[in-house]
Amino acid sequence: MTEGALLNDRYQLLEQLGTGGMAYVYRARDVVLDRDVAIKVLRKDYSDNAEFQNQFRLEARSAANLLHPNIVTVHDFGFADGLLYIVMEHIPGKDLKQLIRERGRFSVKDGIPLMVQACAGIGYAHRAGLVHCDIKPHNMLVSKDMRLKVTDFGIARAIASIAPNERTDVVWGSPLYFAPEQASGEAPTPASDVYSLGIVMYELLSGTPPFTASTAEELARLHISARPIPIREYIPDIPSALEEIIMKVISKEPAARYRTADQLGRVLQKFGTLPDPQPEPAAPVATTPPVITLKPEVADRLVHQGRTQPPPPEAETIQYYQPPQQYAPPPTPQPVYTTPAETEAEEIDWVSVGLGLMAVLSVGGLIPFWLMIYLTYFPPGR
């Protein structure tokens, strides 16, 4: 197809907006309804596959029933000039991948609202029983007023209907963003879309996907078994709550993630865009500091220890602590000084002295008695 061609006698191709591994994208004019539309024309090797054609029609009908502010509306689809095409609303703006390349990365404040919108659209599809299978920033269109819309619902599932020996690297999504179970060849689930949302969020905030490799096989191995570099190494000030959310979303096991995009969106909404809460400063004890200072000898010791005395209040004289004047103590009586002899006399225990004298007298009184007995038995002159 070339620019200026009239597709199916209704859609005039105005300009090519982009190209990918499976389709060309054009801005076109619907000459019947007189409005701009976007048309994705699939490559001939896909369009010629009868099984793919049938599955594509089924997926296109399902996608056309998705009416949500964060999903690109499907207007029409068909087969003309040997090519399958799908007609969608035209979103003036750029896809999220282009914006990441231009800005390097998004701040948490700007990036989280975009992810909440992506979760809202994909979560709506999950409630309708549809799995996107190919979530990547290329499939997220952002208008000038920062409204995000997800596109390409169902195309990856249609491609998966191709016989196994005809499958390509994009059967179950794009290798940079698909879930470990998709990398293993298993059918994707809503939890697989959640994983891909986590990879997109990682890249949106850090500026790089968590896994990069030169081949699809190596990317698949990384998704299955490798641990991503902690996003904090790219964003040291990332809130810890957001870091935990991202690590949960890109868990290897589907059961460890949020089950649907709706759940992830609600968590991000509750999380908001605020940084980690900081401890509240302690309330001041008093507006005017008390007039208390250190004594000179204490202040000198603090200076020798490398510490300083607290600065005094401005315009106030440094003084030592004084007791309140209204409680002045009574006059202190003059002390009576005594001599050392008087002090020693006051300290003699006269009771002990009296008892000692009585003991001496008692012993002395017994001496005559013992002499009388001795002389009785041993008289002199014998």
Image: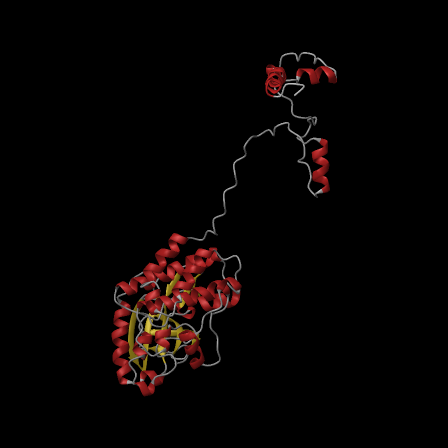
Q: Is residue 85 left or right of residue 339?
A: left
**Quarter the C terminus occupies:** top right
Residue lying furthest bottom: 165
Residue drawn at the location 27% of the way across and 84% of the way down: 50
Front in this rendered view, residue 235 or 290:
290
Give the quadrant of residue 28.
Answer: bottom left
Q: Report the residue at 25% width, 64% height from top.
A: 128
Residue 309 as seen in the image, left or right of residue 287: right
Identified at 42% across, 57% down, the residue is 113
Question: Which of the colour schemes (rainbow, by chain, secondary structure, one colour) is used?
Answer: secondary structure
Residue 352 visible from this viewpoint: no
The location of residue 258, given as percent across then percent down, is 34, 62
Query: Can residue 118 be seen by looking at this rendering?
Result: yes
- Image height check: is 36 above or below 322? below
The image shows residue 186 at horizontal and vertical percentages of 31, 77
Q: Is residue 147 left or right of residue 278?
A: left
Residue 61: percent from left, percent from top: 25, 71
Q: Quadrant of residue 1?
A: bottom left
Residue in the foreground of this view, choosing between 173 and 238: 238
Foreground pick, 27 / 259: 259
Q: Is residue 317 left or right of residue 222?
A: right
Image coordinates for residue 90, horizontal then vertical, percent: 38, 66
